[in-house]
Image: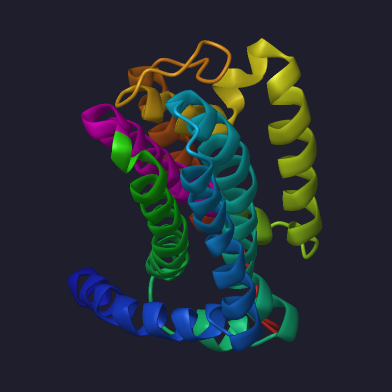
């Protein structure tokens, strides 16, 4: 019986992913996020036209300050909190949870969908921007572009997992996530060096530092440490999300 239940849960994952993608990619949200994703690309074009011969100026001013610090968290917040949030708010989650499938499969499917669309937008934006602005710098420019594409990938997975888990604990997940982004990631992590080990942005910058050498003021966590902490965060947030969903009570249930 357990084998049948396991196979049934695995088989339904693609269907849940498909439904979640349709929910996440609403017209207004998709247009807004596409516009946001073009900002680093437009800035890269201006950087290239200005003929500024400094890789560090582009990585710090556009890749870090704009793409990694602004674009990535915004996209992850909108997709991560919406993966479950809309269904919980309108009550349609009960139809999904009433089905005889494992709660872990639901969390995994939601996570796959939200991470996938976040990755596509953010990594593509960073990759195109890097190709435009860093192409004249040869291999060094390519290393910087690859580093920040990897940073966007790691940051996407971490942020989305964290915000999706958050959405299962509060209906104000969007507000809490924005507060976390602005206060913890934006203000405190830049002022207090000790918070670096608890900052998703620093995990992403640490991973970028494994491809391209960043200054000590930018990447405060070593690449290996950053990747390890990112994995721990994703695993813990996923387990917490599954645990919380298992405790979700259906109306009229025992």
Residue 225 rendering spot, x and y as whole percentages: 39, 18
Q: Is residue 66 above or below residue 137?
A: below
Q: Vertically, is 143 above or below 157?
A: above
Which stretch is magenta? 137-162
Tell me, yes or no, whether the highlighted magenta stretch contains residue 234: no
Give the residue at x 48% y 86%: 22
Q: Is residue 170 left or right of residue 152?
A: right
200 left or right of 5? right
x, y (%) of residue 64?
55, 35
- Of residues 117 and 130, the one nearer the viewer is 130
* Residue 162 visible in the snapshot: no
Q: Quadrant of residue 139?
A: top left
Quadrant showing the N terminus: bottom left
Quarter of the figure that contains the C terminus = bottom right
Q: Residue at x 27, y 36 (%)?
A: 142
Looking at the image, residue 181 lies above or below residue 215 = below
Residue at 75 percent across and 60 percent down: it is: 174
């Amino acid at each position: 019986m357990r084998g049948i239940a396991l196979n049934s849960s695995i088989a339904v994952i693609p269907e849940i992913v498909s439904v979640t993608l349709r929910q996440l990619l609403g017209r207004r949200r998709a247009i807004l996020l596409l516009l946001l994703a073009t900002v680093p690309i437009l800035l890269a074009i201006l950087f290239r036209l200005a003929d500024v011969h400094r890789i560090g100026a582009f990585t710090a001013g556009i890749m870090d300050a704009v793409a990694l610090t602004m674009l990535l968290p915004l996209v992850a917040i909108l997709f991560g909190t919406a993966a479950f949030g809309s269904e919980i708010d309108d009550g349609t989650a009960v139809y999904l949870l009433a089905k005889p499938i494992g709660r872990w499969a639901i969390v995994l499917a939601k996570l796959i969908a939200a991470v996938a669309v976040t990755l596509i937008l953010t990594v593509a934006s960073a990759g195109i921007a890097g190709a435009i602005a860093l192409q004249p710098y040869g291999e060094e420019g390519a290393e910087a572009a690859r580093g920040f594409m990897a940073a966007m990938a790691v940051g996407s997975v971490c942020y989305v997992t964290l915000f999706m888990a958050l959405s299962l604990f509060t209906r104000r997940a969007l507000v809490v996530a924005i507060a976390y982004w602005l206060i913890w990631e934006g203000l405190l992590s830049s002022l207090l060096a000790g918070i670096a080990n608890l900052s998703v942005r620093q995990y992403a910058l640490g991973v970028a530092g494994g491809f391209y050498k960043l200054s000590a003021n930018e990447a405060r966590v070593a690449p290996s440490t950053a990747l390890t902490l990112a994995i721990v965060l994703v695993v813990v947030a996923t387990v917490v999300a599954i645990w919380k969903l298992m405790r979700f009570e259906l109306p009229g249930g025992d």
